[in-house]
Image (spheres, rainbow, N blue to C red):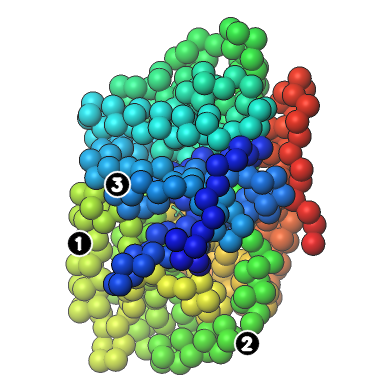
């Protein structure tokens, strides 16, 4: 954190440029008008920060508030380049096309996507602004790494402006099968946008296959396995690069005395239940929060679980609060929790502790440590970092993870208690099995999952992606320096 007016500005060209919708910091304006930047929590920054520092990288993104024309600046040694968005663009590009069209379409259409031409036009315009800025600040033959569904046109726009660049793209959310993607009126433009990259990365192998198949069918390019052959001789490499977390950092936090103390306190405040179940999600309809709580309510109604000795804590972090579908979801969940607590609770014993708020990461680690069963049941999820974070915090090899097979994390965390989140009875049975597992069974599963997240952390993910990207263009001589090992 440093005051905005003390920051040095930066204009020099960078060998590594990150392009993402948001900057890795949030702009905080205080009551007295002074401005601070606060690092936003998240794995992406942790993963990319070391390579950024080693290569004098720059990060292009939106600051999070409307119409702020801000100069590039350096914060804590990182070069940040803010891109302004107007209030109208926030509505049309961000809340509209990104979160009202692409987000539901890419998540199995679990909510109905809206298609509006003005939203699309705004998406094109904003993508062009990001691409132009990247073209301006990237050094000769630099590497540009573009992130996520808000930026899918940037690779081709950037290649047009700067054919010398090495361009990578990574999609953090699922990529849908052709049958769904086809609905999009601008399907071909999006595919062509992505094909501007040398490497197009996805969370799961199936998503990469969906992409290659769509390119073959819709754009007509030749493909072989994960490679796409363009008429101009370029080869685009698709592939899966499952993202991860800062495993060691999180484990260290979980092991700290203050977190241990807080975990104990949380259990005490909840009346020392025999079993504590936990859900942690952004309040999003893809996360399956509603059906999960319904299933839990039925377990109480069926007499399988009693409110005397079991508590469910659901943290739902506020998200996209101006988008209609999110407003409705919030109301639906408020009502369900109210009904379940009203119908099934006793004095001092509500079955569900529902928190619509966001917590510091120490509190999250304490919750993970305190929980006997972590319930992660998205209807569709690119990866789901919460599942991996829970595992990273369980250095005691205790606790059980209930995990949806529709989360990307299910590919790696195979020893979790897997559920189909659409199957309420199945989910009820599996939650019960997880609750009743003995310490030996818990440890067997947890040890195997902990090995997986220890071996594949987020630094590993970033390095693997950048290595594959570096290998795609043998004609280029400029190679990025890897992050220094401590
Ligand atoms: C997208 C994809 C993919 C949540 N509440 C608080 C808090 N969090 C942190 C969690 C976790 C992160 O937010 C959420 O990450 P997820 O992966 O679970 O989900 P999305 O936000 O939907 O992320 C997803 C991800 O991108 C990365 O590629 O895995 O599939 O949808 O790290 O801990 N952190 C703090 N307080 C909170 O209240 N500090």
- Discs 1, 2 touching: Cβ within 8 Å: no
For residue 394, say whether it is visible: no
Residue situated in front as seen by the camera: 88 or 69: 69
Label 1 CB-ligand 1 distance < 8 A = no
Mark 2, secondary structure of its residue? helix
Mark 3, secondary structure of its residue? loop
Looking at the rendered image, the disc whose residue lies closer to the viewer, 2 or 3, is 3
> Residue 405, relative to residue 306: is it above or below?
above
Residue 257's mark?
2
> Residue 402, relative to residue 237: is it above or below?
below
Count residues near mark 2 (Cα–Cα under 10 Å), then give few for <14, some for 14-19, many for 20+: few
Read off the residue under disc 3: 67
Looking at the image, the residue that sits furthest to the top is: 231
Residue 331's mark?
1
Q: CA distance from mark 2 to mark 3?
A: 44 Å
Count residues near mark 3 (Cα–Cα under 10 Å), then give few for <14, some for 14-19, many for 20+: some
Q: Residue at x 21, y 73 (%)?
A: 338
Position of residue 316 measured from the top left corner of the image (x, y, whole percent) = 36, 66
């Amino acid at each position: 954190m440093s005051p905005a007016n003390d920051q040095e500005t930066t204009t020099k060209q960078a060998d590594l440029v990150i392009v993402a919708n948001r900057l890795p910091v949030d702009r905080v304006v205080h009551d007295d008008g002074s401005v601070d930047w606060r690092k936003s929590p998240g794995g992406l920054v942790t993963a990319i920060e070391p390579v950024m520092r080693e290569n004098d990288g720059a990060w292009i993104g939106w600051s999070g508030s409307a119409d702020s024309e801000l100069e590039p600046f350096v914060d804590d040694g990182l070069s940040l380049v803010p891109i302004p968005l107007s209030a109208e663009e926030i509505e049309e590009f961000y809340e509209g096309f990104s979160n009202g069209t692409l987000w539901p379409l890419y998540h199995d259409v679990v909510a109905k996507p809206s298609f509006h031409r003005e939203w699309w036009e705004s998406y094109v315009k904003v993508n062009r602004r990001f691409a132009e800025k990247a073209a301006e600040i990237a050094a000769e033959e630099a590497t540009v790494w573009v992130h996520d569904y808000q930026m899918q046109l940037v690779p081709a726009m950037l290649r047009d402006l700067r054919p010398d660049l090495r361009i990578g793209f990574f999609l953090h959310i699922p990529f849908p099968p052709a049958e769904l993607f086809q609905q999009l009126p601008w399907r071909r433009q999006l595919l062509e946008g992505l094909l501007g990259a040398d490497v197009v990365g996805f969370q799961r192998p199936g998503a990469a296959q969906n992409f290659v198949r769509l390119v073959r069918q819709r754009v007509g390019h030749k493909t072989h396995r994960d490679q796409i052959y363009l008429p101009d001789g370029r080869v685009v490499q698709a592939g899966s690069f499952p993202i991860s977390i800062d495993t060691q950092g999180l484990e260290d936090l979980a092991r700290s005395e203050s977190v241990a103390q807080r975990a104990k306190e949380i259990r005490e405040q909840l009346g020392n239940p025999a079993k504590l179940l936990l859900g942690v999600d952004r309040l999003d309809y893809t996360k399956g929060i509603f059906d999960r709580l319904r299933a839990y309510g039925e377990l109480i109604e069926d007499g399988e679980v009693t409110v005397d000795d079991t508590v469910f804590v659901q943290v739902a972090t506020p998200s996209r609060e101006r988008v209609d579908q999110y407003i409705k979801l919030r109301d639906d969940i408020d009502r369900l929790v109210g009904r379940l607590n009203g119908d099934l609770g006793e004095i001092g014993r509500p079955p569900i502790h529902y928190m619509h708020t966001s917590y510091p990461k120490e509190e999250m680690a304490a919750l993970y440590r305190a929980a006997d069963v972590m319930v992660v049941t998205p209807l569709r999820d690119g990866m789901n970092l919460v599942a991996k974070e829970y595992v990273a915090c369980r250095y005691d090899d205790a606790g059980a993870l209930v995990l949806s097979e529709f989360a990307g994390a299910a590919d790696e965390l195979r020893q979790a208690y897997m559920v189909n989140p659409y199957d309420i009875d199945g989910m009820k049975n599996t939650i019960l099995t997880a609750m009743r597992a003995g310490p030996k069974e818990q440890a067997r599963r947890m040890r195997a999952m902990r090995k997986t997240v220890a071996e594949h952390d987020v630094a590993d993910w970033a390095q693997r992606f950048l290595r594959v990207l570096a290998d795609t263009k043998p004609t280029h001589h400029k190679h990025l320096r890897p992050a220094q090992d401590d």
